[in-house]
Amino acid sequence: MKKNYQISLIKFVTIFLTTVFLAACSQETIKFNNVDITGSKAFGKDFSLIDHHGQKKQLADFNGRLVVMFFGYTQCPDVCPTTMTEMQGVMDLLGKDADRVQVVFVTVDPDRDTQELLSQYVPSFDKRFLGLRPENNAALEKVTKDFKVFYSKVSGKTPSTYTIDHTAGSYVFDTKGQLRLFLKHQQGPKPIAEDLAKLLK
């Protein structure tokens, strides 16, 4: 009886330790170069925007791919072209895995950034990049509020030559549509490519 009890105890301890070990492995956190916002409830989980082909797009349309989401505008003199060029470099570093990444450029200036203009500007960095625009001001307010993106018009010499101050940084959704990272601006392609490669594994 005592021997059977000892055997049962050993089996229980073995199973328990194995379970704890496996749980620890499954919960092992990935170390990223950028800001890990996995599980955050503070940011938008989805969007509904019009792409530069005139098609409505939501997050579910990109299932199976990482989505890198950047907010900007085509007449931006510095942050936007720098970010887009940086992402162009990221795609080069990822090689064949780049086809599993969808970069989306969301304009905060839909008054000037027409569908036609976005279709020329965004793919000029990489033909796979997609320009998205809100249907109206209410949609712009919603998506920027959902993603806590700041933007503010700065008057120019004429009413049409204004600039826009806006958040510099990008969001990354994983292949299952879960928000995972906030990418810092102007860090170079390498650390971003390393983080995306980890999410693609």
Image (cartoon, grey):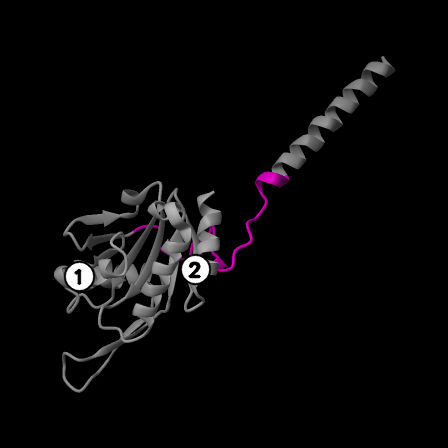
Among the two numbered marks 2 and 1 on one chain, the one whose residue lies closer to the N terminus: 1
In the picture, measured across the screen, residue 71 lies left or right of residue 23, that is: left
Residue 17 point in image, percent of width and height: 71, 32
> Helix, strand, or loop for circle 2?
strand
Q: Estimate the spatial distance between the alpha carbons at disc 2 and disc 1, rounded to whole Å.
A: 27 Å
Which of 21/125 is in front?
125
Amino acid type of the residue tagged 2 in the rendering: Phe
Residue 26 point in image, percent of width and height: 57, 39
Determine the main secondary structure of the stretch shown in magenta.
Answer: loop
Residue at 49%, 60% in the rendered image: 35
Decide: is 181 above or below 157. above
Mark 1 closeness class: few <14, some 14–19, many ≥20 residues within 10 Å: some
Disc 2: which residue: 182
Kindly identify which numbered label has been placed on residue 120.
1
Q: Which residues are magenta?
A: 24-46
Residue at 23%, 61% in the rendered image: 124
Amino acid type of the residue tagged 1 in the rendering: Gln
> Helix, strand, or loop for circle 1?
helix
**Residue 115 appears in which quarter of the rendering?**
bottom left
Q: Is residue 26 magenta?
A: yes
In the picture, measured across the screen, residue 20 lies left or right of residue 133, that is: right
Decide: is 69 above or below 97. below
Q: Is residue 117 magenta?
A: no
